Image: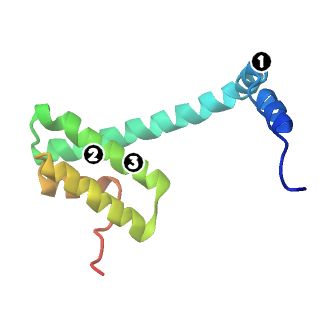
């Protein structure tokens, strides 16, 4: 049974892997890089939110609805970081459908999708 790992070895590997001091050292080593990456993402997020607010201002959206539209924008922003192409278009359509069902105006959501994220509407199969 050469492929079976003995339980003692698994335990040793687990203890070595979950050594709190080792984990702390790894986090401390990467903190500057983590902070730099997060700061870049926060700048991107702010720019996206400002672009969404410009669309909302030009569309005459009520101030009480702005947080919901910003949440829609954040979901599309996240999707853009994970998907591309037709998969992104389909994901955007799902998110748009969800927020339309929540009571937001489809034409405003489509404007955000098109003007801020430049995501084309999905093509029917």
Looking at the figure, which quarter contains the C terminus? bottom left
Name which residue lies at 35% across and 55% down.
Answer: 117
Cα distance in 3D space between marks 3 and 2: 9 Å
At mark 3, the secondary structure is: helix
Of labels 3 and 1, earlier in sequence is 1
Residue 96 in picture, x, y percent from top left = 23, 55
At mark 2, the secondary structure is: helix
In the figure, residue 12 lies in which quadrant?
A: top right
Q: Residue furthest right?
A: 2
The mark found on residue 77 in the picture is: 3
Tell me whether circle 1 and circle 2 mark residues in contact (CB < 8 Å). no
Residue 116 seen in the figure: yes
Q: Is residue 117 left or right of residue 56?
A: right
Residue 23 in picture, x, y percent from top left = 73, 25
Residue 119 seen in the figure: no
Name which residue lies at 88% across and 56% down.
Answer: 1
Residue at which label 1 appears: 21
Residue 36 sits above or below residue 74 on the image: above
Residue at which label 2 appears: 72
Residue 4 sits above or below residue 61 on the image: below
């Amino acid at each position: 049974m050469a492929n079976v790992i003995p339980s003692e070895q698994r335990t040793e590997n687990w203890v070595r892997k979950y050594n709190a001091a080792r984990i702390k050292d790894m986090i401390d080593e990467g903190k500057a890089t983590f902070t730099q990456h997060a700061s870049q993402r926060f700048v991107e997020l702010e720019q996206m939110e400002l672009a969404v607010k410009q669309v909302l201002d030009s569309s005459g959206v009520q101030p009480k609805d702005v947080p919901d539209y910003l949440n829609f924008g954040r979901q599309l922003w996240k999707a853009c970081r994970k998907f591309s192409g037709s998969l992104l278009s389909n994901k955007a359509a799902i998110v748009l459908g969800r927020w339309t069902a929540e009571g937001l105006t489809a034409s405003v959501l489509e404007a955000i999708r098109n003007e801020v994220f430049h995501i084309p509407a999905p093509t029917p199969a």
